[in-house]
Image (cartoon, rainbow, N blue to C red):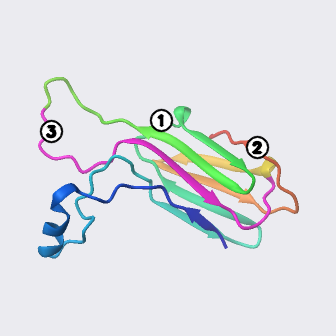
Amino acid sequence: MTRMLMPTIDTDFRPWRGLWSDWGFPANYFVECRDWAPATDIAETDAYFMVTMELPGIDMTKTDISFNDGILTVKGEKHKETSEGECCQCSERYEGSFTRAIEVSGRVRSDKIDATYRDGVLKVTLPKSEESVPKKIEVH
C-alpha cells in the first residue's frame, strides 16, 4: 500500500468563497491556480509499484524524477502556450511548477526503476526488493 504526500494548494478564493457555495458550487470550485498537481494513479502488484502521472505538454528533459528514502519525487513546470497578439478569453489549463512526492510503503530495487513518457503520460515502474538505494531516474 502506498501513501501520497499531497501538495499544498491555496483554496481560499478571496471574498468570493461564500458566494460559490451559495450557488451550489463547492467552496474551492474556482480556485486561484498558483500551484497545481498532475493527476496520478498508483498501483501495486506482488512484483512492483506502478506510478502513472498525466503530464501533457511537459518537457521531460526539464523534469526531475528521483527516488530517495522510499519517496518518489517528480518536479517540473508547465508553460502557457501563447502567440503574439493573442488575447485569452478563457483559460482552464494549469500552468506553473509542480512537485509530487509519493511515499512507497515497501522496499524498492532502485537500480531497476524504469520511467517512460508517451502521449503525455509518465509511467514509473518501481520493482520490489529487499533493500532500497537512492537513484537518479532517467526518462526514456
On screen, residue 6 versus residue 44, left or right, reads left
**Residue 91, position in %: x, y?**
21, 46
Q: To which quarter of the image does residue 42 belong? A: bottom right
Which tag is nearer the camera, tag 1 or tag 3? 3
Q: Which residues are magenta?
A: 87-109
On screen, residue 114 versus residue 92, left or right, reads right
Report helix, strand or loop for mark 1: loop
Q: Amino acid at mark 2?
A: Lys
Q: Which residue is mark 3?
A: 88
State which tag comes first along the sequence, 1 or 2: 1
Measured in 3D between alpha carbons, the distance from the residue under mark 1 to the one under mark 3, in whole angstroms, is 23 Å
**Residue 48, position in %: x, y?**
73, 64
Q: For residue 108: magenta? A: yes
Number of residues whose C-alpha sits closer than 10 Å to that of mark 2, classed few (under 14), some (14–19) or many (20 or more)? some
Q: Main secondary structure of the magenta part?
A: loop
On screen, residue 40 versus residue 42, left or right, reads left
Please tell me which residue lies in front, 79 or 71: 71
Measured in 3D between alpha carbons, the distance from the residue under mark 2 to the one under mark 3, in whole angstroms, is 42 Å
Please tell me which residue lies in front, 11 or 49: 11
State which tag comes first along the sequence, 2 or 3: 3
Number of residues whose C-alpha sits closer than 10 Å to that of mark 3, classed few (under 14), some (14–19) or many (20 or more)? few
The structure residue drawn at horizontal position 76% and vertical position 73%, both measured from the top left corner, is 46
Q: Which mark is residue 59?
A: 1
Q: Which residue is mark 2?
A: 135
Q: Quadrant of the C terminus?
A: top right
Number of residues whose C-alpha sits closer than 10 Å to that of mark 1, classed few (under 14), some (14–19) or many (20 or more)? few
Q: Quadrant of the N terminus?
A: bottom right
Vertical position of residue 92 compared to residue 49: above or below: above
Q: Farthest residue toward the front?
A: 15
Q: Farthest residue toward the right?
A: 130
Q: Amino acid at mark 3?
A: Cys
